[in-house]
């Protein structure tokens, strides 16, 4: 039986005409939405990473306003009170390279999360030491806290290098530095406010901040998988040594510059915390915390803007580093003439902090980008270690110089800034594009 014929015409149309505009608009809209979604996700990642240096910097800066009261309550000397800052920073500085190696060997998150737990728990122990009136317990707990701090911000810097490239990496590193600075701005105010409850309340606040950071890292950060199996320790050390052989001249100079910037910053904060309560200023409590925050605010804003604009522009980085150190040298030198005028004095210290904000993001970008992913944890950790040692040296050395005279303090740091400017100008010469 013959199959009935269909009246339908079997015709296929092909057209060279472009698809309707609404189809193109749909595709473009879809791509735009995907891009916006990716951008929003990246913002959340940035914020999660930023919580780590924020928590770390609270460990020192939040205690600075209460040091004079701690000295009175525990019946200790000014040197002993400075050790509350120094012991934390020395322990962190010594253990940071170990944490860096372990993060290269295993993963960044595997080091950051346990470190935050140790950091918070040691804060509670320090709080109980203060309640018991035991300076020994406070100092021991601060050393343990430094051990926890070793696995926080330095590893977060390496994590940024793993997750982002190009201009995004510079922007993220600028945010890390700005977050570090934001912690410095907020912490004197927070420390002063908490002291209104009881002077040692800051110690018990650490676990709260740590828990927030842990939650952010766990839920918002997806760490990239390692590209290859980590090398053995012998080969690893050999690779690090070869990096310093090839790039040591500018790397070591960068390490020194970053360390000096933090030495001056924390030394000045220690100095201000002590002198603001005395004549002719007579500023204490929350008002003192607000005054301490002013120079730090200048650094924070500058660091974030610098990180956003430098991208990988080596020429711009060189200019900004030299300008930053020039501002530090000039403003710190001028304070020898104006330290009795509170308004001019704080203004000059703010200019110095702006110089620090120009310097640090450039150093961070250059150092993080100087090595491959496998050695990044160790290199950034060595850098962070020296920064911590700079912080550790600030309070006791400034305290010693304050015992001589105020002029001695600022002449010394201005000379050090000039020396560093010379080293950076002659030894750090990045190319047009930093790799």
Image: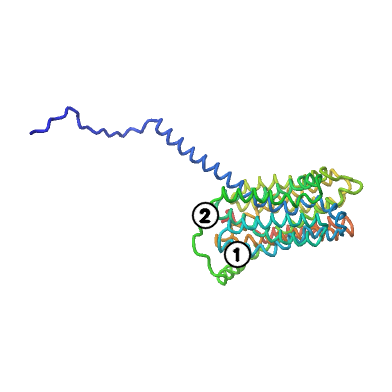
Q: Residue at x 92, y 48 (%)?
A: 279
Helix, strand or loop under label 2: loop
**Front position in the image: 22 or 432:** 22
Report the quarter where the N terminus lies: top left
Q: Residue furthest front?
A: 132
Q: Residue furthest top?
A: 7
Q: Which residue is mark 2?
A: 224
- From this viewpoint, is residue 153 visible? no
Identify the image quadrant of residue 263: bottom right
Determine whether, in the image, residue 93 is placed left or right of residue 332.
left
Q: Residue 241 location, x and y as percent? A: 60, 69
Q: Residues within 10 Å of mark 1 (few under 14, many from 20)?
A: many
- Alpha-carbon span between mark 2 and mark 1: 17 Å
Mark number, residue 32: none
Q: Residue 16 location, x and y as percent? A: 31, 34
Q: Residue 94 location, x and y as percent? A: 69, 65
Q: Earlier in the sequence, mark 2 or mark 1?
A: 1
Q: Which residue is mark 1?
A: 101
Q: Residue at x 91, y 46 (%)?
A: 280
Q: How is the image coloured?
A: rainbow
């Amino acid at each position: 039986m013959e199959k009935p014929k269909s009246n339908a015409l079997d015709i296929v149309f092909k057209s060279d005409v472009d698809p309707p505009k609404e189809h193109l608009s749909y595709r473009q809209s879809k791509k735009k939405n995907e891009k916006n979604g990716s951008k929003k996700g990246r913002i959340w990642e940035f914020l999660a990473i930023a919580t780590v240096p924020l928590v770390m910097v609270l460990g020192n800066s939040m205690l600075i306003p209460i040091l004079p009261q701690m000295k009175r309550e525990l019946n200790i000397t000014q040197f002993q009170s400075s050790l509350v800052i120094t012991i934390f920073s020395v322990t962190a500085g010594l253990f940071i390279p170990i944490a860096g190696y372990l993060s290269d060997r295993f993963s960044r998150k595997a080091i950051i999360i346990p470190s935050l737990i140790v950091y918070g728990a040691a804060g509670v122990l320090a709080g109980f030491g203060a309640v018991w009136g035991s300076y020994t317990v406070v100092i021991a707990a601060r050393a343990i806290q430094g051990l926890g701090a070793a696995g926080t911000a330095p590893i977060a810097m390496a994590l940024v290098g793993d997750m982002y490239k190009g201009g995004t990496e510079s922007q993220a590193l600028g945010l890390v530095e700005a977050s570090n600075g934001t912690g410095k701005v907020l912490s004197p105010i927070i420390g002063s406010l908490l002291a209104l409850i009881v002077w040692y309340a800051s110690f018990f606040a650490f676990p709260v901040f740590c828990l927030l950071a842990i939650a952010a890292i766990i839920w918002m950060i997806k760490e990239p998988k390692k590209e290859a199996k980590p090398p053995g320790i012998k080969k690893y050390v050999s690779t690090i040594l070869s990096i310093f052989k090839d790039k040591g001249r500018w790397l070591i100079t960068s390490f020194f510059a970053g360390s000096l910037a933090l030495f001056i910053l924390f030394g000045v904060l220690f100095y201000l915390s002590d002198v603001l309560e005395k004549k002719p200023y007579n500023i204490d409590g929350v008002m003192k915390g607000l005054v301490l925050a002013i120079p730090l605010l200048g650094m924070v804003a500058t660091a974030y803007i610098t990180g956003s604009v430098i991208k990988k522009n080596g020429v711009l980085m060189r200019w900004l580093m030299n300008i930053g150190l020039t501002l530090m040298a000039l403003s710190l030198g001028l304070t020898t003439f104006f330290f009795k005028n509170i308004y001019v004095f704080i203004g000059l210290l703010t200019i110095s902090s702006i110089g620090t904000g120009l310097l640090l993001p450039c150093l961070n970008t250059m150092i993080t980008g100087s090595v491959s992913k496998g050695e990044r944890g160790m290199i950034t950790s060595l850098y962070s270690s020296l920064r911590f040692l700079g912080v550790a040296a600030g309070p006791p050395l400034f305290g010693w110089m304050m015992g001589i005279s105020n002029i001695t303090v600022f002449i010394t740091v201005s000379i050090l800034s000039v020396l560093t400017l010379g080293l950076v100008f002659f030894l750090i010469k990045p190319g047009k594009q930093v790799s």
